Image (tube, helix red, strand yellow):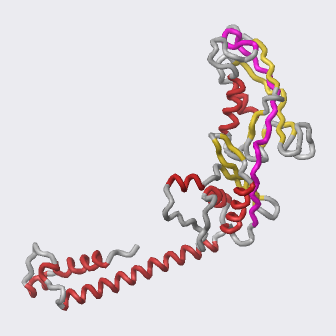
């Protein structure tokens, strides 16, 4: 970054008056500055001001050259999926882009900036011939799909900032439904036969843990049956848990569908098409079975 002219001149004059020959020739006082011993119209002062300006101008040219080089590098770089995700999160609804594909946030407060950044999570998925971008927003701590207007603006933004030749198709959907059939073996001294705690502190501890597990998953991360079992078995009063079966569905598919490998019966691992899941409590079956281990 280019130095200020006065900073450059001070460095020159400090070096000049510290020179022994100059001190002797001009009979300089070592405790005084250059300005205190040379007038503004002196040849020495005018010369050093000219040199300082020339050096400042040269440094400014170097700065500009660096900016242009970085811009060219950025234009020529093939970006990875992490870059696309970051650009998606940078989207500001209702704001226009400058020619440099950057938002001009001049005059906006931090609150206004954060309100405009509506994308809560994004996951780029490489498809055949295009890049699918799964996106959601957040309302009251819950994930929700974008509105049609928001999605249209986001699509325009992404295809403006992405690399030439890369076509981005954004998608935003409600959560995939998760249906479970569980056998929960419980300690009768802690839990009731409906799964609630006998002390009355929790009505649905197993259901609560399932919700918490689904919320803890990274956006577009995998649901893993074994990990869910581990979480449920951490509940006080739960001795064992068996996932008899698990299913998921989205869109027009149903739980029994076999046409799509990403719906229907789950074989240990499933990544939600929408990028996130919610428990279908209506169709989930949890059977509580008393079990007590004796030493």
Quadrant occupied by the N terminus: bottom left
Image coordinates for residue 168, horizontal then vertical, percent: 74, 63
Question: Is 5 situated above or below 112?
Answer: below
Residue displayed at 68% across by 22% down? 205
Which residue is farthest bottom?
43
Q: Residue at x 65, y 24 (%)?
A: 234
Q: How many marks?
A: 0
Q: Quadrant of residue 221?
A: top right
Viewer-closest of 106 and 43: 106
* Position above or below: 186 against 93: above
Q: Residue at x 78, y 39 (%)?
A: 269
Residue 47 drawn at (x, y percent): 24, 89
Left or right, residue 157 beside residue 29? right
Q: Which residues are magenta?
A: 167-193
Quarter assignment of residue 206: top right
Q: Nearer the viewer, residue 154 or 291?
A: 154
Foreground: 115 or 36? 115
Q: Is residue 256 magenta?
A: no
Residue 165 in the image: state x and y as whole percent.
74, 71
Q: Is 219 placed above or below 153 here?
A: above
Measured from the top left, where is residue 176 in percent x and y? Answer: 79, 41
In the rendered structure, does residue 188 fall within the stretch colored magenta? Answer: yes
- Please state if 23 lies on the left or on the right of 294 as rendered: left
Give the quarter of the figure containing the C terminus. Answer: top right
Q: Give whichever of 214, 224 is nearer the camera.
A: 214
């Amino acid at each position: 970054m280019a130095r200020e002219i006065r900073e450059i001149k001070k460095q020159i004059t400090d070096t000049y008056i510290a020179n022994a020959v100059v001190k002797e020739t001009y009979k300089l006082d070592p405790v005084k500055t250059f300005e205190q011993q040379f007038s503004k119209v002196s040849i020495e002062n005018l010369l050093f001001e000219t040199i300082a300006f020339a050096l400042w101008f040269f440094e400014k040219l170097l700065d500009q050259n660096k900016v242009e080089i970085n811009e060219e590098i950025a234009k020529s770089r093939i970006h990875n999926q992490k870059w696309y995700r970051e650009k998606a999160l940078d989207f500001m609804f209702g704001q226009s882009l400058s020619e440099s594909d950057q938002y001009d946030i001049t005059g906006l407060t931090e609150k206004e900036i954060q309100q405009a950044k509506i994308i809560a999570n994004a996951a780029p998925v490489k498809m055949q011939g295009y890049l699918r971008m799964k996106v959601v927003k957040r309302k009251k701590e819950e994930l929700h799909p974008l509105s049609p207007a928001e999605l249209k603006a986001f699509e325009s933004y992404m295809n403006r900032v992405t690399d030439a030749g890369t076509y981005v198709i954004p998608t935003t959907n409600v959560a995939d439904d998760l249906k479970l059939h569980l056998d929960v073996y419980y300690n009768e001294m802690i839990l009731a036969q409906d799964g609630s705690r006998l002390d009355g502190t929790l009505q649905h501890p197993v259901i609560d843990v399932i919700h918490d597990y689904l919320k803890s998953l990274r956006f577009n991360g995998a649901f893993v049956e074994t990990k869910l079992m581990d979480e449920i078995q951490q509940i006080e009063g739960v001795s064992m848990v068996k996932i008899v079966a698990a299913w998921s569905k989205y869109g027009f598919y149903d739980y029994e569908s076999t046409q799509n490998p990403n719906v229907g019966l789950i074989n240990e691992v499933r990544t939600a098409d929408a990028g996130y899941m919610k428990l279908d409590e209506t169709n989930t079956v949890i059977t509580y079975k008393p079990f007590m281990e004796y030493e």
